[in-house]
Amino acid sequence: MKPLYTYLITLTLLTFACSSNSAPFSAQRIVVSGGSITEIIYAFNEQHRIVGVDSTSVFPSAATKKPQIGYVRKISTEGILSLSPDLLLGEADTGPQKVVEQLKSTGINMTILTQEDNFLGIEAKIKHIARLLNVPKKGQQLANSLAIDRAALNTVLQQSTYKPRVLFILNVRSGQPIVAGANTSANELINAAGAINIAAEHIQNWKPLSTEAALALNPDAIITMGRHGDTPMENVSKLAHFKFSNAVKNKQVYSFDGSYLLGMGPRTPQAVVELASVLHPNAKLPTTYKFRFAKTSQPNIELSE
């Protein structure tokens, strides 16, 4: 009888394991490191699962009321573990790496989204997060909703062969503008909007720009970052770097909300449509296209000058 008893116990355990594996794991206590992820989870109407967010999680505004774990690149091991998450979900720049390794060593369930953290990967990011939350239909619906933005962008770009020379300013530190070079999200989005990032030929990543270099670049248009948790940038037309530039002379200086344009979340495709419309003002949007989210571009120049 003993072999039969052992067999029945083994069969019972195997049956339980198979039935457990048949139901996908669905995290209920999620800590988020990255504003686009928070935005996506809110778009799924699954925000009740979020128990903590980083400081870039500023949209929707309700997310800022969640417990904080620090800036996305400076997250805290203790702060995250104190929230007892069953999933840590982070964007590609989650760090520092030492903290990421510490968290891994604790055995915490962690997913860092690296492959989809770009303009062309937004739909894949949405679907990936939907799978992790076991809401694949919501992911497919949200991803599909971005097709109208992609189509509108193509419509704008097809109407213009002009490629304005654009400079993107992240912020100003000690009187020096920090600009987007190659290998930045801003560079990717400027190109997607049918323009040329003039700093990309000379600068890698985000770097300060000297007055002499700025004068030599002489951009046709300047894009600055507005909010994203920071105070609005000072009027760039007052900086010696740009006061004689074509952008300032022609009043082609605009400020965009940072999380909206650079976030690589569900609003970013619309933000690029808005950016392309600003840079190609003579191009017309499809008559059926409507902005679903609030537009954020504002002149960053005193129009009376």
Image: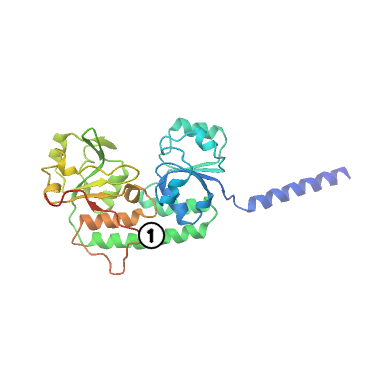
Q: Is residue 82 above or below residue 290?
A: above
Image spot of residue 12 (x, y percent): 76, 49
Q: Quadrant of residue 180?
A: top left
Is residue 89 shown left or right of residue 177? right
Name the foreground residue: 103 vs 237. 237
Q: Residue at (34%, 55%) from the top-left corner?
A: 269
Image spot of residue 243 (x, y percent): 12, 42
Is residue 235 shown left or right of residue 114? left
Q: Residue at (30%, 62%) from the top-left corner?
A: 152
Image spot of residue 55 (x, y percent): 41, 41
Is residue 42 shown left or right of residue 4? left
Q: Residue at (54%, 40%) from the top-left corner?
A: 83
Q: Is residue 174 above or below residue 51?
A: above
Pointer 1: what residue?
Answer: 146
Name the foreground residue: 78 vs 288. 78
Q: Quadrant of residue 34?
A: top left
Name the foreground residue: 97 vs 115. 97
Is residue 135 shown left or right of residue 297? right
Q: Please tell me whether mark 1 sits on a helix, a strand or a loop.
A: loop
Image spot of residue 216 (x, y percent): 13, 39
Q: Quadrant of the N terminus?
A: top right
For label 1, the crowd category at 10 Å Cα-Cα, with few meaning under 14, some 14 to 19 and many 20 or more, is some
Amino acid found under the numbered disc labelled 1: Leu
